[in-house]
Amino acid sequence: MTGVPVGPRVGFRDLVPADTDAILDLWVAAWSAAMPQIDFEARREWFRDWLARLRQEGFALRGAVEGKDGLDTDGPVIGFIALSPPLRYLDHIALKPDRWGSGLGAALLAEAKRLSPQGLVLDVNQANHRAVAFYEKQGFRRLRADRNPNSGLATWWYVWGQAEPPPRVVSGE
């Protein structure tokens, strides 16, 4: 699937609590498309709580928004990242499924790298083949296999630059 190309109308901004419902809708849509065997709608409230925890722990929540130009950041959220620059940990990256293949994922990852220029580490479900291929194409290298302690799903740890997995960060999915 090729999405609408990322262009000069896409900008980035900090996400605020008022964006939560839009982020939840996007998260459910993205994960449901990536792993349809799991009911992510049933996990919506869990993710609402997870976002609140990330905010409390000082994670950067940045949204890709579409506006009249890249400087107009009042448009709808079409993708987001959640990361801790001090830990160099990328907890989440998600974008609307109709934007997959558009370059938006690479733009979101570039924003994460800008915020954490020394390196990034992330974990990804092994069954999410599209995401695994994306991270490898973006220069991440596989560190090791693991298992998500909440879902029990097999995961891979990936690193870009100088980063190591933090002590048992559990994103839940």
Image (spheres, grey):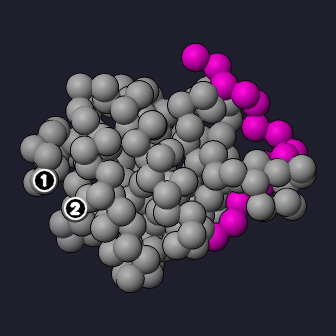
Q: Report helix, strand or loop for mark 1.
A: loop
With respect to residue 62, does 109 lie above or below?
above
Q: Residue furthest top?
A: 1
Question: Which span of residues is magenta-colored?
Answer: 1-14
Indicate the amino acid at tag 1. Answer: Asn
Give me the residue at 16% from left, 38% from top: 154
Q: Report helix, strand or loop for mark 2.
A: loop
Q: Position of residue 6 (x, y in %)?
A: 76, 37
Magenta stretch: includes residue 7: yes
Note whether residue 132 is visible. Answer: no
With respect to residue 76, does 32 lie above or below?
above
Query: Callout 2 environment at 10 Å: few (<14), some (14 to 19), or many (20+)?
Result: few
Q: Which residue is mark 2?
A: 170
Mark 1 or mark 2: whose residue is earlier in sequence: 1
Question: Is disc 1 in contact with disc 2, using a CB cutoff of under 8 Å?
Answer: yes
> In the picture, which quadrant includes the N terminus?
top right
Magenta stretch: includes residue 119: no
Q: Position of residue 100 (x, y in %)?
A: 58, 29
Q: Position of residue 125 (x, y in %)?
A: 27, 39
Query: Callout 1 environment at 10 Å: few (<14), some (14 to 19), or many (20+)?
Result: few
Indicate the amino acid at tag 2. Answer: Val
